[in-house]
Amino acid sequence: MKNRNLRTINILLSLALSSLIGCNNADDVTNAPNLVVLNADVHTVDAAQSRVEAFAVTNGRISAVGSSDDIWAMADDATFVIDARGVTVTPGLIDAHTHLVMGSGLAVGVDLTDMEDKAEWLRIIRDKASSLPEGDWILGGAWNHNLSDGVLPTKEMLDSVAPNHPVWLRDIDGHSGWANSLAMELAGVTADTPVPPGGEILIDSATGEPTGIFLETAGYVFNDAPGMAEATDVSTGIHAAIRMANRFGITSVHDMSGNFDHYLEVLEAGDMTLRIWEGARPRPADGETAADALARIAAERERIRQRVAATGLEAEYGPLFDLGFVKLIIDGVLSTRTALMKEPYTDDPHVTVEPFSTREELHDMIAASHRQEFPVAVHAIGDLGVSWVLDGFAIHTDRPGGLPNRVEHIEVVTPDDVARFLSLGVAASMQPHHATCCVGDYVIDRIGRDRIPNAYVWRSMLDNEVPLVLSADWPTSPLNPMIQIADSIHRETRIDGVVRPWDEGMSLTFKEALKGYTRTGAELTTWADQIGSIEVGKWADFVIYDQLIPDDVDRSVESTQVTATYLAGRQVYP
């Protein structure tokens, strides 16, 4: 007979002993579960049974959900027991728009996301320098001087804390970089260094020397600097980014990197603890048509699937990597006034915006993608860009593999186009932090207060029954889903110098935001019946938090910490 008082272990002991879970494979002969989670506040994201106390895991899959007493009764002496002691448990989180390779510098270097105090920037950089051998590059960044005093940083600041390490840090948007003197010396940079078109090295008018700030393509001057290739090793960065994602409870991402072989190497080494639904970014070679480019990508998909299948890992862990969609771009961003707008920019009505492709080219790419059974995700930030993309989907209405096409970002959209999302069966892929970080920073200036009701309209999407999937677009905003979820609930931004909620009618509930970070992300893939919720038969991807998240969620939810992350019933964090 089982003694519950003796065998029920608290969560900290469970994590320390997680290696004792045992084999979760088809050869197990016991009918008892390998693992049970008891006494939890489980958000299943299953409409039929949205909250339960407990669940069981057998051979990597959810085998039962219900009360703690019922699940406990299924266990035997070999079952590993986690007593959650009342904290919240959710399905593994799915970030539906990220750039793992681009963000890997933050994972291996320094991450200054959302930090307002430049002294804190320098403390973090100093600490990083003290942890590395002299001469090693310090990368990363995500700094935003507009959150601080609005003044760009200088090379002297970096020299004061890391004089013996070359430092190269991108800003939060990736449009500017900040270097120290040693980095510029290694790259051979002077005030007269030529830069590619569109770039600029900022010069100190008093000294005639570079300030340490490099705009746009000027940052390319560091690409071939000694030691940079080793510092930016892709496989190393991917490993670090995956570990970072797991730390935040993320078990799956829709990745926009267009990187295939490095991910496959990680998978084949047995180190893939993240399910990656990868996007391809077609770039037709000279003389190629859209159809030619997509034929090449379809061939890549077949090659990838063969390599994944050869590992045999998916039988044990479930889906891990697939080339699932095509990623296109139609416009730029509001900050640089390169997003396509139906009406002129309020603060610069004479600016001329050029689309990234013509409407004909966009339509050709959508058609070619569909013929190869790829759904399409299109970056469109301005309301005109969104409208153009919907026009393309209105012409090409098929759903490859039954999956919806999607529009990425949708920072401004008119009500008539919101209604078209539903009629066309198109999903909305949006990033909450883009609203809270930027409305008061520059969005109001760009589009004026009259158009603000058309910005970041998450509630309108749900009210119109549009599939709404959430993400970070990391590294342009924090990878931590709890920050994104808090932003979707509270919509706080700095307006006229005061941080306050704005346009509260567009906010989400915790339940809605969690669905956008779990089940909806799964439903945009071929994995919908395998992941995205805690349901019998699905892979046991789940997250245990350090506290009970209350029904009346306040801003403090963003400080909720992940205690443990599980993929297919295996602990992958910590």
Image: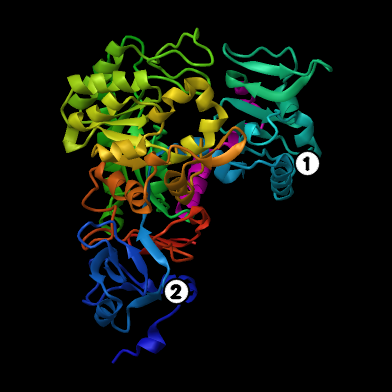
The reply to whether residue 503 is in sight is: yes
Residue at image position (47%, 8%) is 352
- Tell whether 85 sits left or right of 47: right
In the rendered image, the residue lying farthest to the bottom is: 1
Q: Amino acid at mark 2?
A: Ser
Q: Quadrant of residue 35?
A: bottom left
**Secondary structure predominantly adopted by residues drawn in magenta:** helix
- Colouring mode (rainbow / by chain / secondary structure / one colour): rainbow
Task: Depth check: give the residue in front, 248 or 17.
Answer: 248
Q: Position of residue 372 (x, y in %)?
A: 20, 27
On screen, residue 259 above or below 329: below
The reply to whether residue 467 is in sight is: no
Q: Quadrant of residue 259?
A: top left
Residue at image position (29%, 33%) is 325
Element assignment for label 1? helix
In the rendered image, the residue lying farthest to the right is: 207
Q: Position of residue 253 (x, y in %)?
A: 38, 44
Residue 426 colored in magenta in the image:
no
Give the position of the N terminus as an image quadrant. bottom left
Residue 236 colored in magenta in the image:
yes
Task: Give how far apart the Cα atoms at labels 2 and 1 are.
Answer: 41 Å
Q: Position of residue 329 (x, y in %)?
A: 38, 22
Mark identifier at residue 161: 1
Label whose residue precedes the other's in the sequence (2 or 1): 2
Q: Quadrant of residue 506?
A: top left
Give the magenta range. 219-246
Q: Position of residue 436 (x, y in %)?
A: 50, 38
Q: Amino acid at mark 1?
A: Val
Question: What residue would you read off at disc 2?
Answer: 14
